[in-house]
Amino acid sequence: MARVLVPLAEGCEELEAVTVIDLLRRAEIEVVTAGLTAGPVRASRNTVLVPDTLLEAVMDRTFDMIVLPGGLPGAERLDRDERIQALLARYRAEDRFTAAICAAPKVLAGAGLLDGRSATSYPGVVTPEEFPEVNLLEMPVVVDGKLITSRGPGTAMDFALQLIESLVGKAKRDEVESALVREL
């Protein structure tokens, strides 16, 4: 079974976090949510999320993918967290999936993971002026090898479905998507 780590920071975008968690679990992917600090996490729209565990408790566990929800100031908190930076470096070295949505691709860009790669982000978050080495695309979801990025809350479902496809295949993605009764 595929395993995914979703770090939750105060001020994260709840629609992005919950959509990813929900859809991946529908695909029978093990999802572990980990708070940067102890206790519930108050998201950007004041929704309270209760992480499964603390980030510190899962630092040595192996996951197939790490997914960074966006939102502000959540993405900024992820960016400043040394544990997140260590995990990103480890996932890069181990050639594991790394995914980010909305403002969180800036965390990947700042860590150098997007250098020479194609990516997307919330408009104006990752800019050519600040990150000229990133091939910035205005698409809902961009997959470049094991790096997956997305634009924002409105693309969260497409993003989560792409994560499913990347981890466990198109058939499982189609199965989950069909049950959602999405009009395309």
Image (cartoon, grey):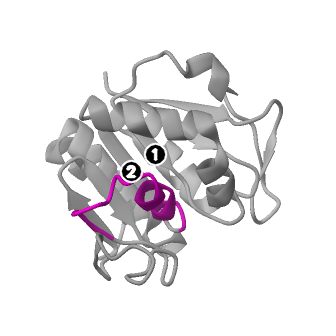
**Residue 104 painted magenta:** yes
The location of residue 88, given as percent across then percent down, is: 43, 39
Dot 2 lies on which element?
A: strand
**Residue 114 painted magenta:** yes
Q: CA distance from mark 2 to mark 1?
A: 5 Å
Dot 1 lies on which element?
A: strand
Mark 1 packing: few (<14 Cα in 10 Å), some, or many (20+)? many
Q: Give the residue at mark 2.
A: 99
Image quarter for residue 137? bottom left
| 99 displayed left or right of 142 | right
Vertical placement of 3 versus 36: above or below?
Answer: above
Nearest the viewer among 131 and 68 is 131
The location of residue 83, given as percent across then percent down, is: 59, 33
Vertical placement of 1 versus 116: above or below?
Answer: above
Image quarter for residue 73? bottom right
Q: In which quadrant will I find the C terminus?
A: bottom left
| 89 displayed left or right of 38 | left
| 28 displayed left or right of 103 | left
Nearest the viewer among 108 and 160 is 108
Q: Earlier in the sequence, mark 2 or mark 1?
A: 1
Identity, as a three-letter code, of the amino acid under mark 2: Ala
Is residue 181 visible from the viewing direction of this image? Answer: no
Q: Residue at x 20, y 58 (%)?
A: 144
Identity, as a three-letter code, of the amino acid under mark 1: Val
Check if mark 2's residue and mark 1's residue have beta carbons within 8 Å: yes
The location of residue 139, given as percent across then percent down, is: 30, 78
Q: Give the residue at mark 1.
A: 67
- The span shown in magenta is 103-119
